[in-house]
Image (tube, grey):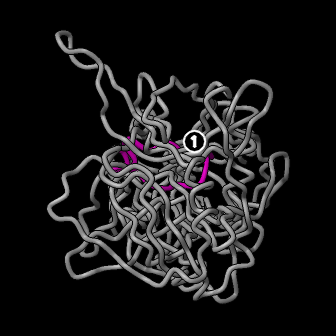
Amino acid sequence: MDEHNTHDYENDHKETDQRTHTFEKETVEAPASPSETTTKSSDVPKRKNSLFAIWMSGITGGLTVAIIGFLLLFTGVIPLNQQLTTTNENQTATENVINMSDNSDVDTNMLSNVGEAVVGIANIQQGNLWADSADAGTGSGVIYKVEDDRAYVVTNHHVVDGASDIEVILTSGDRVTAQLHGSDELTDLAVLSIDAEHVTTVATFGSSEDLTVGDTAIAIGNPLGTEFAGTVTKGIISGLNRELSIDSNQDGQSDWTVDVLQTDAAINPGNSGGALINSSGEVIGINSMKIALEAVEGIGFAIPIDEAQPIIEQLEVSGTVTRPFMGISAVDFSTVPRQHISETLNLDPNDVSSGIVIAEVHPNSAAQDAGLAVYDVITDIDGTAIESMMDLRQYLYQETEVGESITVTFYRNGEQQTSEVTLTGE
């Protein structure tokens, strides 16, 4: 399991969705197997180390604890009791549904102007040896800025992920080549730019902090692809600070929590990256997810614009998001087979009941400099309990900064110890 970062989304009245959602189509850098890393404890029998390392290798294979960013959302349907899907257009509609509602508080001229700034995004991927490149999927994007000769577009990471080329589809139907400035998997945001000569209108960012439940919410995007480009659906803000647990690598453990706006404005496949606007025409969110289950209607999600803007700015300027980096790969203590708690970790189960077990210390990392080692069990940081990798990420990304020192409390061979770790950037 690897580290990643974002902003502080804490709210005393957060409503938490305890379900864990699994996202498909994610590329994850595979770390060295923990079985290739030897423990520094001479007290642990070799055979036991080997068995434990094999177990940890199975848990942590394909994960990297590089502190990268805020996960978010990837294409495909999530195989859960309640399926959560991202909404780039990669599936076939079975029926058309027309929603009609009161539009007395909506300025249709305003909608027309904002609609010009919502565009289609074509993810073009190279075919096999005998096939030409073709659209692998389409999503939506929002033109939010023109500077010099470039117009900037925000969309979702999963909309452009894996693309060999990207094209922006204008409201006129014309397709223009786009440059990818940066993409952040954890926040599911990406920034593109196109030649400004093609742009006549840009969207205005509003504030998601000022929203209240019941406020008008209007989704604009390209559901089901370009055939229905510029579709407008109206609803309300159904919930604020909705917290969804995300399992990005499908290992059965929550990797991150996503803080989102909930709306009943229709968000369908192809809407990903499109705008959620208020009645004044200001962008208050970037559409991203929708619960897709026959028994569930009117539950869509958007990334709050106040939380998206700092990420957008970093991607625009530097192409990446810099976050604190500790430099470990680890697994949740709750997944350790009971026999290894005493035999391999040399712990009394009555003394330690939760935490994370270090499976790998990255070379030349902050953790290595602080003397942390494989099989150390981290239980808290700066007095805050760490019971899972998700807790670790949330603390690092929301409570710390690059260059800051943190106090890590851990157990090694049954003894509680502390170490000062100076976080680096990644």
The answer to whether residue 43 is visible is: no
Instruction: Between residue 108 and residue 258, name the one nearer to us.
Output: 108
Provide the secondary structure element on which disc 1 rests.
strand
Helix, strand or loop for the magenta stretch, by majority: loop
Amino acid carrying label 1: it is Ala
Disc 1 residue crowd, few under 14, some 14–19, many 20+, Cα 10 Å: many
Quadrant including the C terminus: top right
Residue 103 lies left or right of residue 279; in this view the side is left
Question: What is the residue that sits farthest to the right in this orientation?
Answer: 404
Q: Residue 362: x percent and y percent?
A: 59, 36
Q: Residue 394: x percent and y percent?
A: 63, 64
- Residue at image coords 50%, 25%: 176
Instruction: Between residue 271 and residue 279, name the one nearer to us.
Output: 279
Residue 423 lies left or right of residue 214; in this view the side is right
- Residue at image coords 54%, 26%: 178
Let me know if residue 28 is in the magenta part. Answer: no
- Residue at image coords 21%, 65%: 96
- Residue at image coords 80%, 47%: 402
Residue 80 lies left or right of residue 240; in this view the side is left
Residue at which label 1 appears: 190
* In the rendered image, the vertical position of residue 294 relative to residue 343, given as above or below: below
Let me know if residue 68 is in the magenta part. Answer: yes
Instruction: Between residue 212 and residue 77, name the one nearer to us.
Output: 212
* In the rendered image, the vertical position of residue 308 relative to residue 237, given as above or below: above
* In the rendered image, the vertical position of residue 195 relative to residue 189, given as above or below: above
The answer to whether residue 327 is visible is: yes
The residue range painted magenta reads: 55-75
Residue 291 falls in image quadrant: bottom left
Instruction: Between residue 283 and residue 393, name the one nearer to us.
Output: 283
